[in-house]
Image (cartoon, grey):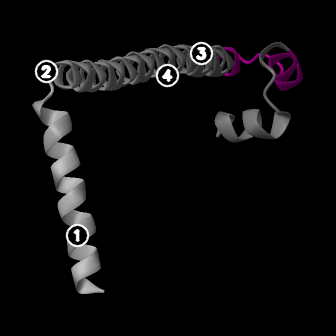
Amino acid sequence: KVAKVDAVIKETVDMYKEIIADKETQELLWAQEKYRLDHLSAVGYAADVAEQRGIQIGEQRGIQIGEQRGMQIGEQRGKLEIARALLSEGAPISMIAKCTGFRISELEELKK
């Protein structure tokens, strides 16, 4: 069995040497390898571009969310300042609650 396997290996090696020795075959193998490498490079480039685009979209969405949240916080602080000013002027709590959206209990706590 070992001799049979050795003979198959020798025959395979001989065929490989014949193929490699042929200039046309070498050129064909090189062209196939170049195509494969070019394809891998293109796929890698496309993946990099897609990743960068995903990062850009994520950053833009994060900025939008941050801006929205900042505006909400600013509005809330503005209402709080108005409520404090109206409370200090003696405005009725029910009117302040209606104008600012704060609950009466929140305004009573703020008044303390």
Kindly report the secondary structure that dominates the magenta region of the rendered protein.
Answer: helix
Q: Is residue 88 magenta?
A: yes
Image height of 51 relative to 108, above or below: above
Residue drawn where x is 16% and y is 51% of the image: 14
**Which circle's residue, 3 or 4, is located before the other in the chain?**
4
**Which circle's residue, 2 or 4, is located before the other in the chain?**
2
- The residue mark sitting in front, 3 or 2, is 2
Residue drawn where x is 53% and y is 18% of the image: 70
Measured in 3D between alpha carbons, the distance from the residue under mark 3 to the one under mark 4, in whole angstroms, is 15 Å
Image height of 26 relative to 3, above or below: above
Q: Which of the two residues, 6 or 75, is positioned nearer the viewer here?
A: 6
Which residue, given by chain and number where applicable, does mark 1 sit on?
7
User: In which quadrant will I find the N terminus?
Assistant: bottom left
The 10 Å Cα crowd at callout 1, few under 14, some 14 to 19, many 20 or more, is few
Which residue, given by chain and number where applicable, does mark 4 sit on?
58
**The magenta segment:** 85-98
Instruction: Residue 20 in the image: state x and y as whole percent.
Output: 15, 35
Q: Is residue 5 magenta?
A: no
Mark 2 residue type: Lys
Mark 3 element type: helix
- The residue mark sitting in front, 1 or 3, is 1
Instruction: Residue 18 in the image: state x and y as whole percent.
Output: 16, 39
Image height of 66 relative to 107, above or below: above
Question: Would residue 68 appear left or right of 47 to someone viewing this image?
Answer: right
Measured in 3D between alpha carbons, the distance from the residue under mark 2 to the one under mark 1, in whole angstroms, is 27 Å
Mark 4 residue type: Gly
The 10 Å Cα crowd at callout 4, few under 14, some 14 to 19, many 20 or more, is few
Which residue, given by chain and number where applicable, does mark 2 sit on?
23
- The residue mark sitting in front, 2 or 4, is 2
Mark 3 residue type: Gln
Measured in 3D between alpha carbons, the distance from the residue under mark 1 to the one under mark 3, in whole angstroms, is 76 Å
Which residue, given by chain and number where applicable, does mark 3 sit on?
68
